[in-house]
Amino acid sequence: MSLFLFGLTFILAVIHWVTVYKHWLKAELFFKPAVMASLFAALFITSPDLANGLGFFAAAVLFSMAGDVLLLFPSRFTLGLAMFLVAHICYIVGFNIPLPRLSPFVILLAIFVLVPANWLYRRIRAGLLEKGLRRLRKPVQAYMVILSLMFLSGIATLFRPDWPLPAALPAAGGASLFAASDTLLAWNKFVRPLRSRRVGYMIAYHLGQMAIIAGALLKDRDF
């Protein structure tokens, strides 16, 4: 059942990528939330008790689905950003159950993540100011901090004994893809349009979300 539902999620994602590429807006209104709804079903049906932190991963998927819908409407951009902010917080909590010990290696890893994140924020902030969007500076700054923590939490699973390697690999890879997707979106919107535009970061986004959930289920030995 797990493989079937993940396969269905992937098929829906591919269809959504086509709707984005072809600019089929009406079809996108259906398929964009359908991808995350299918992923939530895959998680819930595979592990209905949502134990061992899986509840936070489920909440992250639901908040992401809400953000997906809101971002379809330009006037709801800030609210959509808030939904994804909460989704990232849920992933941070889920990745860190049980709470890991703080080690010198984790501190070094944090520096490795936060230094380039700070550079990215400065570029995005400059783009915001150029476009007269000063009001978004603080929300985007908060989002970048939370996004960096989510990415750090995902990568850190590779070095934690409570995350078996078969679970940590997709979790870390998924966190990386999700972070890359959000970074590409912000860069495309506020700094400079990218050739791949939305198709590129939607592919990274969906594959990232699927990999994170697969990793969480593998950790819980339900996949």
Image (tube, rainbow, N blue to C red):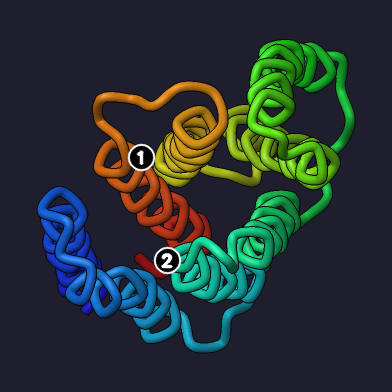
Instruction: Name the residue type under label 1.
Output: Tyr
Horizontal side of 124 relative to 4 (left or right) equals right
Q: Which residue is mark 1?
A: 201
Residue that appears at 78% across and 55% down: 98
The residue that appears at 14% across and 57% down in the rendered structure is 14
Along the line of sight, the residue nearer the viewer: 29 or 109: 29
Q: In the figure, is residue 123 to the left or right of 204?
A: right
Rounded to the nearest whole Å, what is the CA distance between mark 2 and mark 1? Answer: 15 Å
Label 2 or label 1, whichever comes before in sequence order: 2
Residue at 39%, 27% (x, y): give it. 193
The residue singled out by tag 2 in the image is 72
Residue 168 seen from this side: no
The percent position of residue 61, horizontal first and vertical second, equals 51, 69
- Is 1 situated left or right of 35 in this image? left
Q: Amino acid at mark 2?
A: Leu
Can residue 75 be seen at all in this image of the molecule? yes
Identify the image quadrant of residue 204.
top left
Task: Say if 218 sits above or below 131 in the image.
Answer: below
Foreground mark, 2 or 1, reads 2
Q: Residues within 10 Å of mark 2 (few under 14, many from 20)?
A: some
* Mark 1: secondary structure: helix
Instruction: Tell me the quarter of the picture where residue 32 sits.
Output: bottom left
Is residue 203 rendered to the left or right of residue 10?
Answer: right
Residue 113 pos. (x, y %): 69, 19
Could you tell me residue 31's position as x and y percent? Answer: 24, 73
**Up-down relation of residue 164 to residue 86 (above or below):** above
Report crowding for label 1: few under 14, some 14 to 19, many 20 or more residues within 10 A (C-alpha).
many
On-image quarter of the C terminus: bottom left
Against 213, is 140 above or below?
Answer: above
Residue 27: percent from the left, percent from the top?
17, 74
- The quadrant of the image that shows the N terminus is bottom left
| Residue 30 location, quadrant | bottom left
